[in-house]
């Protein structure tokens, strides 16, 4: 069990004061012999049993100096999850006091991550290099291949104005729908690849060519904050006299989607040169550059 060191120390001081007061009580009245025996017994209990026990808790380093087990293996912080897996019928109440020692990676809530991003506690990974629109200049991209990810939480960022426009788009000849969502993930042991490119003409589907010999990779864990933007333009055309009849018309719609984001690693990544690119098992979950718009279909912009 975790404990508050200050509260335990306050208990020690209170026990010591109570023991001292009991020791100082004196009387020579024969009628108070039984009462004095009870007071003496209480003094011995406090001074010889409880005070040494409380002092041993304060002197112990078990809760402040410990070696954490691997992530996913039950220890002090992970015990509730471990019990739930082992005995699904058990119910474990949440501890009202913080657990001392290192925090389990990925245990922050959505609000805690957002607050630590705002206050600068969480430091983002260095941004990709930007070509700043100069033809022939080098720039880099960051691709994340998630080894394991979980969603920490989501938040709707759509403005009230866009929600009103979306509402009134129903039934109008011309409509516009736009939604923005912030999603925070925790990536565990993800592979991030930094590639260098040259700003020149390329196919948006295939992407730019990679500069040989400048690819680097690292394995990282941390929080990924991604803002997804989706917009749809709708135009309806009537082809019959009854414009209220949906069967006497047709609609054309065009949808666009993009995303931007930043990654906040638990520790700075150690990028190492990649001599031979391994075959792509699947497309990376996210690829970022610092351009104002995504350079390639499926790429996003660094910064959210």
Image (tube, grey):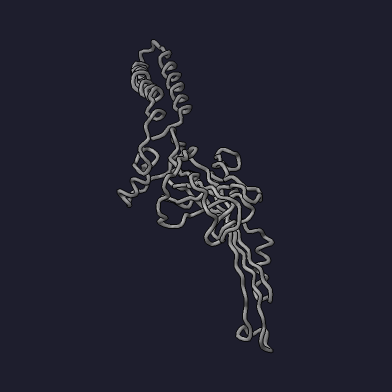
- State the residue at coordinates (60%, 64%): 256
- The image shows residue 118 at horizontal and vertical percentages of 60, 42
- The image shows residue 220 at horizontal and vertical percentages of 45, 43
Image quarter (top left, top right, bottom left or bottom right) of the N terminus: top left
Residue 301 appears left or right of 97: right
Residue, far bottom: 241
Residue toward you, 54 or 162: 162
Total marks in image: 0
Residue, far top: 28
Residue toward you, 195 or 166: 195
Q: On screen, 23 above or below 56?
A: above
Residue 205 appears left or right of 190: right
Residue, far left: 86
- Res 121 quadrant in image: top right
Q: On screen, 233 above or below 38?
A: below
- Res 189 quadrant in image: top left
Residue toward you, 297 or 254: 297
- The image shows residue 299 at horizontal and vertical percentages of 55, 56
Residue toward you, 90 or 243: 243
- State the residue at coordinates (61%, 61%): 179
Residue 214 appears left or right of 240: left
- The image shows residue 36 at horizontal and vertical percentages of 36, 17
Q: On screen, 179 above or below 198?
A: below
């Amino acid at each position: 069990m975790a404990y508050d060191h200050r509260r335990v120390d306050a208990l020690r001081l209170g026990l010591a004061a109570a023991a001292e007061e009991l020791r100082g009580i004196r009387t020579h009245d024969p009628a108070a012999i039984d009462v004095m025996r009870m007071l003496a017994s209480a003094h011995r209990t406090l001074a010889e049993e409880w005070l040494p026990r409380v002092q041993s808790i304060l002197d112990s380093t078990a809760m402040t100096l410990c070696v954490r087990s691997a992530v996913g293996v039950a220890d002090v912080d992970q015990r509730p999850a471990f019990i739930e897996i082992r005995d699904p019928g058990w119910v474990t109440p949440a501890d009202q006091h913080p657990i001392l020692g290192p925090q389990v990676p990925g245990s922050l809530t959505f609000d805690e991550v957002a607050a630590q991003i705002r206050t600068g506690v969480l430091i983002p990974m260095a941004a990709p290099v930007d070509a700043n629109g100069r033809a022939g200049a080098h720039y880099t991209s960051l691709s994340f291949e998630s080894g394991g990810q979980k969603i920490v939480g989501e938040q709707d960022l759509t403005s009230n104005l866009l929600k009103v426009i979306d509402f009134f788009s129903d039934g109008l000849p011309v409509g516009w729908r736009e939604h923005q969502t912030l999603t925070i993930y925790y990536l565990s042991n993800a592979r991030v690849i930094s590639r260098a490119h040259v700003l020149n003409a390329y196919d948006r589907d295939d992407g730019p060519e990679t500069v040989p010999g400048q690819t680097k990779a690292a394995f990282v864990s941390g929080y990924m904050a991604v803002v997804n933007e989706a917009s749809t333009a709708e135009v309806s055309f009537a082809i019959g006299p009854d414009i209220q009849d949906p069967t006497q018309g047709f609609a054309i719609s065009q949808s666009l989607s993009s995303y931007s984001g930043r990654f906040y690693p638990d520790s700075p990544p150690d990028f190492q040169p990649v001599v031979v690119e391994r075959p792509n098992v699947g497309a990376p979950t996210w690829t970022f550059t610092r351009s104002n718009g995504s350079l390639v279909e499926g790429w996003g912009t660094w910064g959210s």
